[in-house]
Image (cartoon, helix red, strand yellow):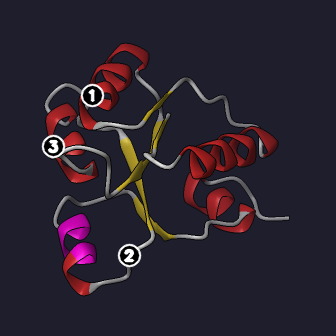
Amino acid sequence: MIVEDDFLIMEYLRELSEDIGLNVLGTADVAEQAVTTILENRPDFVFMDLRLGGDRDGVDVAQAIQPDMPDLKIIYITGSSEPTSLARIRADHPYEVLIKPVVERDLRRAVGIPVN
């Protein structure tokens, strides 16, 4: 599952994910849609952008789904390396944090696929 508000980045992550053998179950670009889609599809991993369109961000989405899916592996993908943004992500105990631009090696490592 990919949660990203930038269409081009979302498509890039979809292609990269499929190239390494992952099945993308769905995408979302706003928090409300993300919560619904994640709960309906029950993915193993979510690639979660921190900043989303609207009032809620990726951490808000993670906190909303956590009671129903406590073992979901959330991999935050953010363009911000600001200490306050990273602190907000880390406080949510993410599975992994990747800084944009994400490359194949980083994605493979994050989901446990051997790096070529």
Give the overall secondary structure of the magenta segment. helix
Please tell me which residue lies in front, 21 or 114: 21
The residue under the point 22% across, 52% down is 59
Q: Is residue 12 left or right of residue 20?
A: left
Q: How many marks?
A: 3
Please tell me which residue lies in front, 12 or 77: 12
Report the residue marked by disc 1.
Answer: 35
Residue 21 placement (x, y as % from top left): 76, 38
* Dot 2 and dot 1 residues touching (CB under 8 Å): no
The residue under the point 21% across, 32% down is 65
Callout 3 secondary element:
helix
Residue kind at label 2, given as amino acid type? Ser
- Vertical side of 115 occupied by 20: above or below: above
- Mark nearer the viewer, 2 or 1: 2
Label 1: how many Cα within 10 Å (few below 14, some 14–19, many 20+) = some
Q: CA distance from mark 2 to mark 3?
A: 20 Å
Residue kind at label 1, given as amino acid type? Val
The stretch of residues the image draws in magenta is 85-90
Report the residue marked by disc 3.
Answer: 63
- Vertical side of 98 occupied by 111: above or below: above
The residue under the point 30% across, 38% down is 71
Whichever of labels 2 and 3 marks the residue nearer the N terminus, that label is 3
Q: Quadrant of the C terminus?
A: bottom right
Label 2: how many Cα within 10 Å (few below 14, some 14–19, many 20+) = some
The residue under the point 50% across, 49% down is 6
Report the residue marked by disc 2.
Answer: 80
- Vertical side of 3 occupied by 27: above or below: above
Q: CA distance from mark 1 to mark 3?
A: 10 Å
